[in-house]
Image (cartoon, helix red, strand yellow):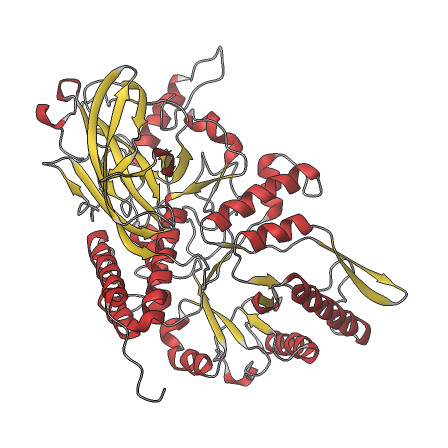
Amino acid sequence: MNAYFTLRPAPGRKFPSRLLAALMVLLSAVGITQAQSAEPQGSPEDGSKPGRGVSIWAAGSTEKIQNRNRAALPHDCVWNAKTRTVTVSGARGEIVPFQLVVSVTKEDVSDVTVGVPDLHFEKVTLPASRVRAFLEPFVVVYAPTGGNGPKARWPDPLVPLSRPFKVSAVPTGDTRNQPVWMEIHIPRDQQPGLYTGEIAVRSGDTGLGTIRLALKVWDLTLPEKRHYPAHIGLYENHIARMHGVEVDSDAFRELMKHYLRFFLGNRMDPRTSPRMRGRIQDGNYVLEWVEPEVEQIFLDGGRVQFQMSPVPVGIPRPGREEPFSADYLRHIKAHVRQVIDHAEKAGWLDRLVFLIPVDEPKNAAQYEEVRRWGTAIREVDAKVRVTVTEQPSPENAAWGSLVGHVNAWTVNGNYLFTDADAIRARHRAGDMVTWYISCDQLYPQPNYYIDREAADPRMVPWLTWRYDLDGILYWTSTFWEEVLNPWIDPITWKWFPCNSPAAGEGSLVYPGHLVERYTGQANVTGPVGSIRIALLREGLEELELLRLLSDSGGRKAADEITATLCRDVRDFPRDPNQIDAARERLLEELVRIKAKPPTPAAPGR
C-alpha cells in the first residue's frame, strides 16, 4: 500500500468523469500536483541507486519534509552528504530523533525496508532494539491555518514501521520523498562515546542505499524525575466515538490506559483523573476511588501534577440562580477534603492542583464565581494549590482581583508580554505560573498546527524557561468533533470563530485502529503519535537539561543560552540549525560544570 493516501472507488464501481475532473481541480488547488525541489539525487559512489532514480539521505528532526519539497529552513546540520553520515548526540536517558528519507524520481519502489544495526563504540554496543523507526504518512491540508502554511500534503502521523512500504514515483518525473522518523532511545547506563553503525534501505532483496549513523553519547544523564508539568487534555467522549466503544465500558477503560501510557511515555501529563464515584449518604457527600490501576499508571509514569476538579461528582450542580447553596458548598468542601486525604494517603499530595471550573473568566460575575470556588477550597486547606485559566491582572479593574483566592495561574500566552510585570510579581510571591497556547495565539507566536514550522513545538519549552514559568498546558489532543477522522481530514478546527480553519488544532494524535486502512502498517492499540508530539517531547527534555544546568550552579549560563535563542514569545528562531547550536552549548556547559572540581569548603565549615 502506498505510504500516502489514495482515493479509491467502491469495489465494482468507477468514478464518474465529472467527479474525476473536479478532483483533479481540487488536488491542483491544494498544491498536490505541483513539483517542487527536493534533496538532489545520489551518485554511484554514495550507495544509492541513481539508475533507478532512488536517493537515500537524512535530515534532523526539526523539519517537515513534504512529499515533493523540503522546508524553507532545512534541518541539515546533522547530514554530511559527502560521507553520507548523519551525526546526532544526546544525554543518557534522552530520545534522540532524526529523519531518514527515501526519494524517488523514475519508478515506483516497493517492499521498502529500513535495516537498523547495533551501534558500536570500541567494545561497547548500543543494541538495535533501542533504535525505532516510524513511517511519516502525509495528510492533506486543504485549508491553510490562518493563511500561513501552503495547501499541501504535510507529514504528521508517526506510525510504527512494522511492514515494508511503497514509494510511488510521480508521472512527470519530479522527486517524491518518503520520510521515516528515527528515534534512538539512549539507555540510562550507556557508556559515553561515539557510537557508529550503518542503516541499510532495501527494496525486497535489492539494496537501495545506506547511510552511516554516528551517535555521540554525552557523559550526562537526563534526570529521571520530571519537574515541569505538560498538561495535555483528552476528550474521552471523542476517543470513544472514534474507536466505536461506549465511554462507560470495559473496552473503553482498557483503551484509555493505552492513551495514558502513551502521553506519560512522552513526558506529558494527561489532563484526566482516576475515575471517582460520588453520592449522598445519610445527608453527607461520600467519594469513592474506583480505578486504582489508573492511579498507579499515573504514579508509575511519573505524572508531575494531578489537576483535579473541585466539583463534587455524582450529584447535580445547583442552577445559576443559587450556584453556591449552603448544602452544595458543604458538598464541595467534603469533596475537596476527601480528594486531599486520598492524595496524601496515595503519595501525591505535593502534586495536587485544583483547577477552578471557570475557564478564562470574562466578566465580573465570573470573577466572583472564581473567588467563591477559591475560598471554598482554601478554607479546607490553605496550602493546597488552586489554579484558574487566567492572568493575574484582570482585563477590567472593576472585576476585582483574584490574588489570594488562587495561588497558581494558568496564563494564555498572549499575556506573557502584556501582563509580564504582574506575572513576575506573583511568581516572586510564591505562586505557580504555567502557560498555554490556544487558537487565538497567532504567528509569530508558536502554535501546534500541522502546517507550521517544525520548530514551534520544540521551542515552547525553551520559552517556558525564558519566562521562568513552571509548566505548560494544552486544552486537548483529541478534538475530533468536526471530522470523520483526522487521518482523512486534518482540518479539525472548522467552525469556531477563533482562527478557523486550523489544521491539527486540538488534535495531536491519531486513532491507532485505523493505521492499516490508511498506511498499510499494522494497527496500533490506542493512539498514534505525531511529529508535533515528538518535537514537544524533545523540547521538554531540553527544558529538563536547562534545569539540570541551573541546579548544578549554571543558572547564569542557562539563562544566557536561552536568551540568545528566545528573545520573546513573538521573537525566537525557527531555524533548526540555530536551535541545535544552542542545544550543543547547553550540553557542553553541563559537561564543563560536571568536570569542574568542587570548591573547597571555607575553614571551620
- Lateral position of residue 268 relative to residue 444, left or right: right
Q: Position of residue 363 (x, y in %)?
A: 57, 75
Q: Position of residue 492 (x, y in %)?
A: 47, 45
Residue lying furthest bottom: 604
Number of marks drawn: 0
Rendered image quadrant of residue 571:
bottom left
Which residue is found at the position 40% from the left and 68% from the top?
414
Question: On screen, 444 above or below 266?
Answer: below
Q: Position of residue 447 (x, y in %)?
A: 37, 56
Which quarter shows the C terminus?
A: bottom left
Which residue is found at the position 34% from the left and 51% from the top?
92
Residue lying furthest top: 12
Task: Give the camera-side residue of 264 and 413.
Answer: 264
Asked if one can make out residue 481 in the rendered structure from this viewpoint, the answer is no
Task: Give the camera-side residue of 342 and 242.
Answer: 342
Which quarter shows the N terminus?
A: top left
Which residue is found at the position 49% from the left and 17% from the top?
10
- Lateral position of residue 581 relative to residue 453, left or right: left
Residue lying furthest front: 604
Q: Position of residue 159 (x, y in %)?
A: 41, 34
Question: On screen, 516 above or below 599?
Answer: above
Asked if one can make out residue 290 in the rendered structure from this viewpoint, the answer is yes
Task: Give the camera-side residue of 133 and 158.
Answer: 133
Residue lying furthest right: 282
Rendered image quadrant of residue 590:
bottom left
Rendered image quadrant of residue 362:
bottom right
